[in-house]
Amino acid sequence: MPKARLTAEKFQPGQSVPATGIYSVRHRTHRPVHQAILVKGETFPHCIKCGNSVRFQLVKASPSMSDRART
């Protein structure tokens, strides 16, 4: 999957994380946008307050982080 497409795509809770990296996390209204580091193969989490309305968008993929996560 091309990197440009990954960065434009928005992900939702329950989907598998496609690439290790930094993701922008957007909640409904209760919290400002923030970032989280997620590892390929994990599942995007739901939010305790807004449930499945939270969305994730890849900001920066990091293949070197994937290598470190396996060791």
Image (tube, rainbow, N blue to C red):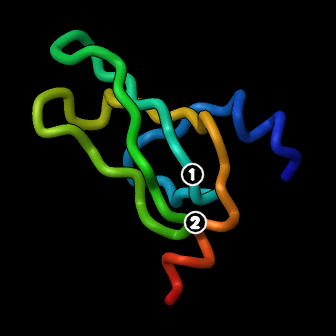
**Disc on res. 48:** none
Disc nearer the start of the sequence (1/2): 1
Tell me what residue is drawn at x 53 percent, y 39 percent.
11
Please give the residue where the numbered disc 2 appears in the rendered image.
Answer: 65
Q: Label 1 sits on what residue type?
A: Gly
Disc 1 and disc 2: Cα gap in Å?
7 Å
Name the residue nearer the viewer: 19 or 65: 65
In this rendering, position of residue 64 left or right of residue 54: right
Name the residue nearer the viewer: 16 or 33: 33
**Marks 1,2: beta carbons within 8 A:** yes
Q: Position of residue 42 (x, y in %)?
A: 44, 66
Give the residue at the far right of this rendering: 2
Q: Nearer the viewer, mark 1 or mark 2?
A: 2
Please give the residue where the numbered disc 1 appears in the rendered image.
Answer: 21
The relative height of residue 69 versus residue 18 in the rendered view (above or below) is below
Q: Position of residue 28 (x, y in %)?
A: 28, 16
Q: Position of residue 24 (x, y in %)?
A: 47, 31
In this rendering, position of residue 48 left or right of residue 52: left
Name the residue nearer the viewer: 22 or 55: 22
Q: Label 2 sits on what residue type?
A: Met
